[in-house]
Image: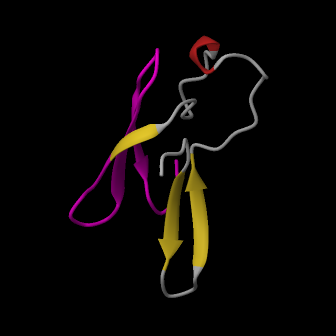
């Protein structure tokens, strides 16, 4: 399964946090200019040993790599 959204599951509370989701204009994914959020499918993911930092990479015409905090999802 591929998506443009990172999901963090807090196993102790069974709550979820999300990274990359945002309402955007109804335009082509490749025409968006907002690089703070994924606009295409996430195809790679890595997590630091301490589980604080997450790196996600997207595919598409304008691929990008995002480094974000798993606690704050910023």
* Rendered image quadrant of residue 14: bottom right
Given residues 41 and 49, the one toward you in this image is 41
Q: Residue at x 36, y 51 (%)?
A: 54
Q: Residue at x 59, y 69 (%)?
A: 16
Q: Is residue 21 above or below residue 35?
A: below
Q: Is residue 7 visible?
A: yes
| Colouring scheme applied when the structure was drawn | secondary structure
Given residues 30 and 68, the one toward you in this image is 30
Q: Is residue 72 visible?
A: no
27 horizontally vs 65: left or right: right
Given residues 64 and 69, the one toward you in this image is 64
- Does the magenta segment cover residue 66? yes
What are the residue bounds of the magenta stretch? 45-74
- Does the magenta segment cover residue 10? no
Q: Residue at x 67, y 16 (%)?
A: 28
Q: How many marks?
A: 0
The location of residue 56, given as percent across then percent down, is 38, 42
Judged from this view, the residue extending furthest toward the bottom is: 12
54 horizontally vs 25: left or right: left
């Amino acid at each position: 399964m591929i998506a443009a959204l990172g999901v963090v599951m807090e196993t102790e509370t069974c709550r979820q946090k999300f990274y990359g989701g945002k309402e955007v204009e109804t335009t082509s994914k490749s025409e968006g200019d907002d690089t703070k959020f994924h606009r295409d499918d996430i195809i790679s993911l890595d997590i630091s040993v301490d589980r604080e930092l997450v790196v996600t990479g997207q595919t598409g015409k304008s691929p990008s790599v995002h480094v974000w905090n798993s606690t704050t999802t910023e």
